[in-house]
């Protein structure tokens, strides 16, 4: 893979993180293909979202419902809206047989809400479909280090 | 000196200490949670000899295991030597439980099998070694495969404790499986909030709040364009909260002895009118005949709430249990069941519904928990002494013969009357 292409993928991932951090959620949704899958497992090394519960396992339609809700009217949970930072590192990109690229990164996610600041760590993988000079997200998976443990305290309306 | 706490429950109101006083919480452990039957798990978690799972019972760490003779035992997860946990796994299969500290080794019925360098003990120890074991839970019993434990050696038997109305919820959950058998599957959800356990207990039978508190989620669900396709089950569970206040007020509710209660089902009709449900209903009719199948499927309850900490949803094959951690911290653990003989896709749909409704990412229950935390904070710090639970009490006073409906807070008062009986 060319350095330039690797750089473009990385910039794309940083762009996604920034849209989430700046709560530009419609723009964030637009990065996803209509048939995309967004998955945050509820078990470490979870094999399938079908036979085990997940923290998130959503179609774009469900993500849209989430975003729509946040943009129309804040519920008690989201008022005031939390401030968040997504830190991505260790970005690696692989080209496969198909046109799609597989990207992975480590995630540190810090959230400040009301009087509390908390953080989560995890590993993220994306399947990216080239589209012009940019990409569409075909799938995103976030494996939190504490997915199977302390998740009870997470409580978030906005994805990672 | 045993303090009487019954006066914290007044007529149509409860005192804020009911939710906030750590001394009250300690006494609840002793006088309620250590006296009643509490849900442990399901027999399907223990299929083979040696299968075990760990859980908590009234705050104590417990191992539940199937012994080589097939009998199910529940005992404290605490070595009788120095008190270390003997089993760190959530579930698995074991021939024995070996304490990681000094290797005291126990059989799957909890009996002590061996200690290292046994000769280091005198004759007195060796003579009583045969009687040493991981401390058993005082009583263990099952109703239709649902396992319960009690720290009290005496008291009502399990069936009496549950009563006919609660047993009907378990019966129906099992009967909804075409093969008449269910299996706990799909992992569990954990939601934790910094509030008292009774806030969730009240909320589960509070029919006035959904349309109001969950409005933003309901409205978002309303705006979803399904593009002509049948709506997904995840959408439905959000959307269903959007009955009008008048519709909520017409919903059937029931309050039973020992603080138990139930509420009628409220899911939209869409959930019963898709191709998958039609396939399932056909299987049920083949197994049971038209009449019996429709009897089973007509059992339309949402939660049956088993005092003090269990929510049974027969229709959705789900169970939730409250694990109070401290006076102001509570965990809600959610489990689901696979109905044997039903199409696999039904279980997949249940999994998706739980993701949306009972996981930490839920846009419904997260708002409930947010409210509980705000209540807890304001009650802990304020001068406000009493919380009002008097809605519908005038009908109760008048001895109305009609069954209570909808937004009447009678089931909450019924819960708190049971509380006062235990705590008074």
Image (cartoon, rainbow, N blue to C red):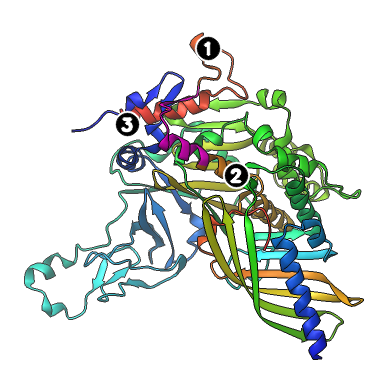
Q: Name the residue under label 1.
A: B394
Q: Quadrant of residue A159?
A: bottom right
- The correct choice, above or below, for A101 with respect to B413 in the image is below
Q: Is B60 a magenta residue? A: no
Are dots 2 and 1 on a single chain?
yes
Q: Which mark is residue B261?
A: none
Mark 2–mark 3 distance (CA, rounded to whole Å):
32 Å
The stretch in magenta equals B374-389
Q: Mark 2 points at which residue?
A: B173
Residue B356 placement (x, y as % from top left): 68, 52
Q: Which of the chains bears the disc numbered 1?
A: B
User: Is B180 displayed left or right of B45 in the figure?
Assistant: right
Q: Which of marks 2 and 1 is nearer the N terminus?
A: 2
Where does residue B218 sit, x and y in percent of width and height?
A: 74, 40
Q: Disc 3 marks which residue?
A: B423
Mark in front: 2 vs 1: 1
Q: For the residues tagged 1 and 3, is the chain the same? A: yes
Q: Are marks 2 and 3 on the same chain?
A: yes
Label 2 secondary element? helix
């Amino acid at each position: 893979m060319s350095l330039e292409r690797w750089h473009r993928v990385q910039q794309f991932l940083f762009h996604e993180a920034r849209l989430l951090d700046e709560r530009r959620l419609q723009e964030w949704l637009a990065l996803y293909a209509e048939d995309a899958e967004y998955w945050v497992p509820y078990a470490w090394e979870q094999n399938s979202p079908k036979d085990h519960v997940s923290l998130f396992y959503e179609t774009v339609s469900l993500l849209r419902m989430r975003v729509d809700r946040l943009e129309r009217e804040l519920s008690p949970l989201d008022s005031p809206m939390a401030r968040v930072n997504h830190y991505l590192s260790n970005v690696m990109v692989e080209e496969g047989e198909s046109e799609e690229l597989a990207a992975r990164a480590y995630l540190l996610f810090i959230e400040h809400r009301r009087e509390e600041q908390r953080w989560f760590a995890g590993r993220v993988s994306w399947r990216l479909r080239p589209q012009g000079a940019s990409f569409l997200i075909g799938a995103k998976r976030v494996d939190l280090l504490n997915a199977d443990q302390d998740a009870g305290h997470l409580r978030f309306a906005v994805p990672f | 000196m045993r303090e009487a706490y019954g006066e914290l429950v007044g007529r149509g109101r409860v005192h804020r200490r009911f939710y906030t006083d750590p001394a009250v919480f300690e006494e609840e452990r002793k006088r309620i949670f250590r006296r009643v039957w509490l849900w442990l798990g399901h027999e399907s978690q223990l299929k083979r000899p040696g299968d075990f799972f760990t859980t908590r019972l009234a705050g104590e760490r417990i191992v539940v295991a199937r012994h080589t003779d097939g009998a199910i035992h529940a005992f404290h997860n605490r070595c009788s030597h120095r008190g270390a946990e003997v089993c760190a796994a959530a579930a698995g299969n074991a021939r024995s439980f070996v304490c990681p500290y000094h290797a005291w080794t126990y059989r799957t019925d909890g009996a002590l099998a061996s200690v290292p360098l046994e000769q280091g003990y005198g004759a007195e120890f060796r003579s009583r070694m045969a009687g040493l074991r991981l401390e058993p839970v005082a009583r263990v019993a099952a109703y239709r495969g649902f396992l319960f434990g009690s720290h009290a050696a005496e008291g009502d038997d399990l069936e009496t404790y549950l009563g006919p109305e609660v047993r009907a919820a378990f019966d129906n959950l099992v009967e909804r499986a075409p093969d008449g058998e269910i299996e706990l599957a799909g992992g569990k959800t954990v939601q934790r909030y910094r509030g008292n356990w009774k806030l969730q207990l009240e909320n589960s039978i509070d029919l006035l709040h959904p349309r109001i508190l969950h409005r933003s989620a309901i409205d978002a669900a309303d705006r979803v364009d399904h593009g002509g396709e049948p709506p997904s089950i995840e959408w439905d569970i959000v959307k269903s909260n959007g009955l009008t206040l008048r519709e909520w007020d017409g919903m059937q509710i029931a309050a039973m002895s020992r603080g138990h209660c139930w509420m009628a089902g409220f899911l939209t009709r869409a959930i019963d009118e898709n191709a998958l449900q039609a396939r399932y209903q056909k299987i049920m009719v083949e197994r049971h005949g038209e009449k019996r199948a429709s009897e089973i499927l007509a059992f339309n309850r949402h939660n049956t709430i088993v005092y003090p900490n269990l929510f049974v949803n027969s229709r959705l094959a789900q169970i939730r249990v409250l694990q109070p951690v401290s006076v102001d911290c509570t965990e809600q653990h959610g489990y689901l069941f696979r109905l044997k003989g039903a199409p696999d896709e039904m279980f997949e749909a249940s999994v998706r519904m739980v993701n949306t409704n009972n996981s930490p990412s839920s846009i419904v229950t997260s708002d409930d928990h947010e409210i509980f935390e705000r209540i807890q904070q304001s009650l802990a710090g304020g001068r406000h002494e009493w919380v009002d639970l008097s809605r519908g009490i005038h009908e109760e006073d008048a001895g109305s013969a009609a069954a209570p409906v909808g937004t009447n807070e009678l089931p909450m008062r019924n819960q708190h009357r049971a509380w006062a009986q235990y705590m008074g």
